[in-house]
């Protein structure tokens, strides 16, 4: 649910563009990954369910890593119409934001302003029994300790 914005990259003549160390993390913000589950299930690759325009709200604030202890142990929560669907702590992430940026920089060119998703807690709707999917009119609220909240109203998909 949290994203990482990059500030600076440096070029290594042998390795190409790489991100520096933690100072390359300008800040942390919400990144709400809304997935088109019908598209995601079409193949074994999940990217197609996560690539739609207007389906990844971000913000509303950007905080510097030092303001939130480098995101070492922040509470993360997602609610739909007030019901808690996901709740965890950033200390439960398999990799820290800095480690994720360092790893991603080995495979893709990162530029200032890039936003990288760091992961999501368990409880995603598609994995629930029975599955739970967002519906038009529902309110999706994500909250990250020290980063505030991001509130979004679900609307019906436009035809065409």
Image: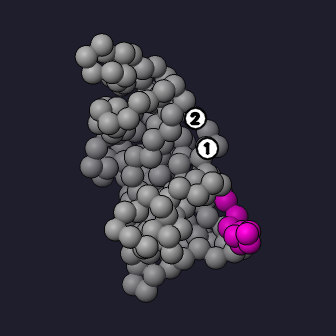
Depth order, front residue of 53/87:
53
Q: Is residue 2 magenta?
A: no
The residue at 48%/27% (across/down) is 111
Q: Is 94 drawn above or below residue 136 in the view shown?
A: above
Say which residue label 1 marks.
Answer: 59
- Dot 2, crowdedness within 10 Å: few (<14), some or many (≥20)? some
- Locate residue 153 relative to residue 99 in the image: left or right: right
Residue 52 visible to the viewer:
yes
Q: Disc count in the image?
A: 2
Residue 31 location in percent, x, y?
53, 48
Residue 135 location in percent, x, y?
64, 76
**Local secondary structure at mark 1:** loop
The residue at 38%/35% (across/down) is 108
Q: CA distance from mark 1 to mark 2?
A: 7 Å
Q: Is 16 drawn above or below residue 98 in the view shown?
A: above
User: Answer yes or no: do the residues labelled 1 and 2 have beta carbons within 8 Å?
Assistant: yes
For residue 59, which quarter of the picture? top right
Say which residue label 2 marks.
Answer: 62
Circle number at residue 73 = none
Residue 28 visible to the viewer:
no
Residue reaching furthest to the top: 13
Please tell me whether the stretch drawn in magenta is mainly helix, strand or loop. loop
Question: What residue range appears in magenta?
Answer: 151-160
Q: Is residue 153 magenta?
A: yes
Q: Is 131 drawn above or below residue 105 in the view shown?
A: below
Residue 45 location in percent, x, y?
37, 63
**Local secondary structure at mark 2:** loop
């Amino acid at each position: 649910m949290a994203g990482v914005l990059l500030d600076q990259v440096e070029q290594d003549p042998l390795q190409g563009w790489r991100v520096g160390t933690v100072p390359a993390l300008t800040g942390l913000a919400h990144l709400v990954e809304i997935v088109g589950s019908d598209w995601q299930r079409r193949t074994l690759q999940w990217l197609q369910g996560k690539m739609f325009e207007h389906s990844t709200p971000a913000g509303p604030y950007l905080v510097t890593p030092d303001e939130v202890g480098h995101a070492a142990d922040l509470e993360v929560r997602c609610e739909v119409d007030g019901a808690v669907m996901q709740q965890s702590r950033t200390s439960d992430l398999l990799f820290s934001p800095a480690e994720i940026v360092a790893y991603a920089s080995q495979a893709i060119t990162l530029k200032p302003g890039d936003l990288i998703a760091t992961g999501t807690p368990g409880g995603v709707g598609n994995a629930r029994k029975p599955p739970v999917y967002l519906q038009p009119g529902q309110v999706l609220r994500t909250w990250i300790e020290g980063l505030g909240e991001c509130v979004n109203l679900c609307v019906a998909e436009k035809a065409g």
